[in-house]
Image: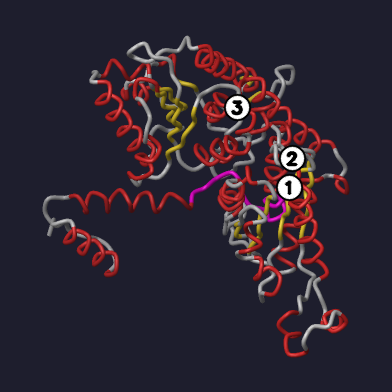
Amino acid sequence: MFAAQRINVSEDRPALHIALRAPASEPILVDGSDVVAEVHAVRARCEELVRALHTGSWRGHTGERITSVVNIGIGGSHLGPAMACEALADFAVAEIAVRFVSNVDGADLRRALLGLDPARTLFVVCSKSWHTQETLVNATAARRWLLEGLGAGEEAVAAHFVAVSTNAQGVREFGIEERNMLPIWEWVGGRYSYDSAIGLSLMALIGPERFAEMLAGFRDVDEHFRSTTLERNIPALMGLLAVWNADIVGAESRAILPYAARLERFPAYLQQLEMESNGKHVTLAGDPVAHGTGAIVWGQPGTNGQHAFYQLLHQGTRIVPCDLIGFAEPLSEHADQHDLLIANLFAQGEALAFGRSAQQLREEGAPEQQIPHRVCAGNRPTSTLLLERLDPRNLGRLVALYEHSVFTQGVLWGIDSFDQWGVELGKILARRIAAELSAAEGSDQRHDSSTSELIRRYRRARGRQ
């Protein structure tokens, strides 16, 4: 990976998210071109744009200062920056509201635009190919909202839209000026990309200096992973444990349980990182795998989860390995509550490991008829990650730990962790069905009986049949 070999074998590409945080002094060559130099050039453009927002020199079509940034994307173009903006909200450096739109459901866009002033709003549209259906539908609707709100023509688009894409022609046709297009590269997958220009909305929130601190955190773990011996290599050990728990213990899922309210979106971010990377059924050579791959990842912050699903973790019939994540220093002014939060974090690790036996319950005086119901078997696997505090550098470290853990798992399983062909079929069928749903007359449906009947029922409900 660090040598830029084409380890994404099905797409014949390198996987070089590590180049997004490499120093300019360490070139990485792909087809004779130094991609690290390209990364630093794009980052400089991002910083210039963000400083224009922060100083007020970026003005909208009517001359108003931009006060809101709306990120339009989906998948890695949404989950990463949205997670990071929530995680690092306490480090915001400017009075700029950042909102996110991903779902093609129009209610998502309406929620994001509620209360915003078109004259003061900048949209960041993130689509590598500029063909992502959900993103372009939302971007088109946002453009319509903008122009109607301003009472302006297409010339207003240039002052209110930025694109992160590889498709210069598509971006120009949309109305975005090329100087406001930030490139992304084929060698970085969306789920590994929020430390690129995909993270522009995050940089707008926390500023270029804090963004650089986050990149330094990523780099800390990159170097640790590359140079540390296996028995002390944290992401490698995390990957080994994940494979052990999945294929030896037989656990089918893993819970991500951050004891930090700001990491509310972190489990969803890891869902994509892990399940899209390692949810594969063939090896690098294209042969069927002979073992399980890719756990089901889920979770939510503690202590909320303790009052929701921890019952199953402690006494259910399914083994669910848990990652417990905490921070020694509080960020809130309510610091007196932090000891209780961390006490719960440590207590859950102890309780899941050692449980409570019938003998202990008897010694505690529990009623005999309750004892079978109150026994906790223990021996539930957990890993606890305790960091100093939730700041940009440590967020970078935390994400990179999981990135390299996922890579380790893929190597052990002999699969390609960097393609995602499984998402293609649904997209293809959705395009065909969308045309059939909106057609004026009934179409010649080429589907199974269940799907065909659903299409007919929907068309009747919308008065089209």
Hey, what amino acid is under mark 2? Pro
Q: Is residue 53 magenta?
A: no
Q: Which residue is mark 2?
A: 330
Q: Which residues are magenta?
A: 408-421
* Label 2 packing within 10 angstroms: few (<14), some (14-19), many (20+): some
Front-lying residue, 49 or 189: 49
Q: Secondary structure at mark 3?
A: loop
Give whichever of discs 3 and 1 has the lower sequence position. Answer: 3
- The total of numbered circles placed on residues is 3
Residue 422 as seen in the image, left or right of residue 355: left
Give whichever of discs 3 and 2 has the lower sequence position. Answer: 3
* Label 1 packing within 10 angstroms: few (<14), some (14-19), many (20+): few
Q: Is residue 417 magenta?
A: yes
Hey, what amino acid is under mark 3? Ala
CB within 8 Å, label 1 to label 2: yes
Quadrant of the rendering where the N terminus is positioned: top right
Hey, what amino acid is under mark 1? Gln
Q: Which residue is mark 1?
A: 337
Where's residue 144, x and y in %?
27, 29
Depth check, mark 3 against mark 1: the one in front is 1
Task: Look at the picture and state if 387 lies above or below 58.
Answer: below
Q: Residue at x 41, y 16 (%)?
A: 178
Q: Which residue is mark 3?
A: 92
Give whichever of discs 1 and 2 has the lower sequence position. Answer: 2
Calculate the distance from the C-alpha at mark 1 to the C-alpha at mark 2.
9 Å
Where's residue 262, x and y in %?
63, 42
Q: Residue at x 24, y 67 (%)?
A: 453
Calculate the distance from the C-alpha at mark 3 to the C-alpha at mark 1.
23 Å
